[in-house]
């Protein structure tokens, strides 16, 4: 097995909502954006998106921050910003920090945390102990390019993809080295309580066959293999037997495995992520 190393990791996207501070009925954040002569600011312009009726774009170093607000005083959050901190320079972050200082009751509603590998690991199998549904996208030759575990509508899901190919397809950039990315998204209540979240829990990258305990019945082992391979749905089993098979699957080990949760603990990625978010919400 290729010795895998996490090259780096960071927030790839964050969404923060809150209530704009007001001078009487005038929202200060909207006033600041509307009066800004900063060339990075585009807007405000009219939109019709849920409770929001104004939008502003702020050009950052390598991306664009999207801000949506309500000019009317409403009972739900009237401010929303979505941006990628890793694509902001120091001046961009100063601007965003000041803007957020004009907002109260701030909370995260979405956080995307990514880790990068400069190895071609798309041939590895992603093992997820939660047994969530998955969607795969493959090349015409059958090579895995993108894998989703869990629904994008749920409060947390995993995305595993060939970042090098994505950069070439979307941005026409040729990257010299291999580049694969594993990304986890948490939303709503889980994003609000981000400091309690265990990133990439139960996620492993493996490049070998599963190893079962010798005392497991051959029939149960075969059923577990079929479920792990996606050839059978555990929901089709009787509840008692499904519970037994689930325990067997959870006990499986691999000769060559990369435990993502344990490896990320050896880095400062999660600590740095929490520090960035706490400063934004301060």
Image (tube, grey):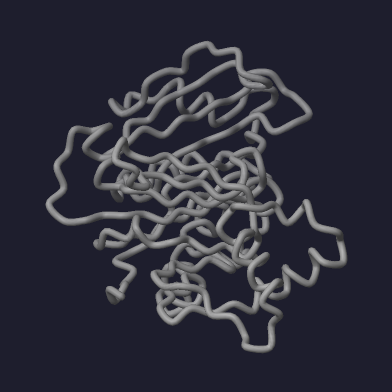
Q: Residue furthest front?
A: 219
| Residue 61 shows up from this direction | no
Residue located 25% across and 33% down the image: 169
Q: Position of residue 54 (x, y in %)?
A: 55, 18
Locate residue 65: give its quadrant: top left
Q: Residue furthest bottom?
A: 215
Residue located 53% across and 42% down the image: 135
Foreground pick, 198 / 144: 144
Q: Quadrant of the N terminus?
A: bottom left
Q: In the visual, does 23 lie left or right of 14?
A: right
Q: Position of residue 179 (x, y in %)?
A: 26, 54
| Residue 187 shows up from this direction | yes
Q: In the visual, does 280 lie left or right of 243?
A: left
Q: Position of residue 227 (x, y in %)?
A: 64, 59
Foreground pick, 135 / 53: 135
Foreground pick, 255 / 16: 255
Residue located 59% across and 40% down the image: 152
Foreground pick, 37 / 189: 189
Q: In the visual, does 130 lie left or right of 87?
A: right
């Amino acid at each position: 097995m290729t010795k895998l190393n996490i090259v780096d990791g960071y927030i790839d996207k964050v969404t923060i909502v809150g209530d704009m501070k007001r001078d009487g009925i005038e929202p200060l954040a909207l006033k600041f954006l509307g009066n800004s002569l900063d060339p990075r600011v585009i807007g405000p312009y009219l939109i019709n998106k849920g409770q929001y009726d104004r939008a502003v774009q702020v050009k950052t170093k390598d991306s664009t921050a999207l801000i949506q607000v309500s000019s009317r005083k409403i009972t739900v959050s009237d401010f929303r910003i979505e941006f990628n901190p890793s694509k902001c320079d120091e001046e961009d972050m100063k601007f965003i920090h000041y803007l957020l200082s004009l907002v109260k009751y701030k909370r995260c509603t979405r956080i995307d945390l990514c880790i990068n590998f400069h190895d071609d690991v798309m041939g590895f199998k992603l093992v997820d102990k939660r047994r969530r549904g998955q969607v795969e996208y493959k090349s015409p030759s059958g090579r895995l390019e993108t894998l989703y575990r869990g629904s994008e509508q749920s409060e947390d899901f995993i995305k595993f993809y060939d970042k090098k190919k994505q950069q070439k397809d979307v941005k026409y950039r040729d990257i010299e080295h291999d580049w694969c990315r594993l990304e986890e998204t948490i939303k709503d209540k889980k994003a609000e309580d981000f400091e309690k979240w265990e990133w990439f829990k139960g996620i492993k990258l493996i490049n070998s066959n599963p190893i079962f305990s010798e005392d497991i019945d051959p029939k149960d082992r075969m059923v577990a293999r079929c479920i792990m391979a996606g050839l059978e749905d555990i929901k089709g089993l009787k509840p008692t037997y499904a519970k037994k098979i689930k325990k067997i699957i959870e006990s499986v080990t691999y000769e060559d495995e990369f435990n993502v949760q344990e490896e990320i603990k050896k880095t400062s990625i999660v600590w740095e992520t929490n520090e960035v978010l706490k400063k934004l919400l301060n």
